Image (tube, grey):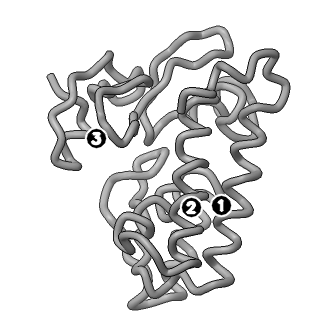
Amino acid sequence: MPCLYCSEEGFSIGHHGACIHCNSAVCVAPGGRRDRRFHGENCVCGCDGLFCLKHFVAHAQDEHGMADGAACFPRLWTRIGIRGIRGGAALRARVGSPPEAAHDATEFLNTIRPGHEALRQAARELPGVAREYPEWGNRGEPKIIFEPAFFNDAVAETVVAQAADAVGAAYEGRPDPADVADL
């Protein structure tokens, strides 16, 4: 069975297990994609449960009392942070593929900071710039998708800064940075 997320993106990548929360097939790092994307990780906080992109943050918060997913899922947290840096920088410089850059920045905003729940409020205040995509969020709420026009210079710069901070959080307290170095 292929990874659910890869299938939705047009790829046929084998899965490495199923998310404990939703039982969706997910791929983990190192994945089989040339772009190095992966969509799940085993929790490193002792429970070793496999969680998907939609549910890893809620698991870290609800089961381990963490503020975010950096400590429990450093590889996934870092991968999303790196994509946020790349996406925000490409949008700021107005280079690269705007849809891919907007996708990477939007994934970061929904998943890590500020998170999809905060974005749901913003989407109501920004008609025509943001829209909801059904059944995505950490607890099943809709994902918020921003149009490329939303990412003005200030927003793009904020995404880059926040994503860099998130990557740093994944390394914080890690005795061996090699744990996430191959991402």
- Residue at image point 51% right, 18% down: 42
Expressed as whole percent of the image width and height from the top left, the position of residue 143 reads 41, 60
User: Counting residues from the N terminus, which is met first, the one under dot 3 or under dot 2?
Assistant: 3
Q: Could you say whether the residue bearing mark 2 is in a helix, strand or loop?
A: helix
User: Counting residues from the N terminus, which is met first, the one under dot 1 or under dot 3?
Assistant: 3
* In-front residue for pair 182/15: 182
Residue at which label 3 appears: 5
Expressed as whole percent of the image width and height from the top left, the position of residue 71 reads 72, 28
Q: Could you say whether the residue bearing mark 1 is in a helix, strand or loop?
A: loop
- Residue at image point 39% right, 90% down: 128
- The answer to whether 154 appears left or right of 129 in the picture is right
* In-front residue for pair 182/135: 182
Q: Amino acid at mark 3?
A: Tyr
Expressed as whole percent of the image width and height from the top left, the position of residue 107 reads 47, 56
Q: CA distance from mark 1 to mark 2?
A: 6 Å
Q: CA distance from mark 1 to mark 3?
A: 22 Å
Expressed as whole percent of the image width and height from the top left, the position of residue 168 reads 77, 42
134 shown above or below 59: below
Quadrant location, the N terminus: top left
- How many residues crowd around disc 1 within 10 Å: few (fewer than 14), some, or many (20 or more)? few
Residue at which label 1 appears: 114
- Residue at image point 63% right, 16% down: 44
Residue at which label 2 appears: 109
Q: Amino acid at mark 1?
A: Pro
Q: Amino acid at mark 2?
A: Leu
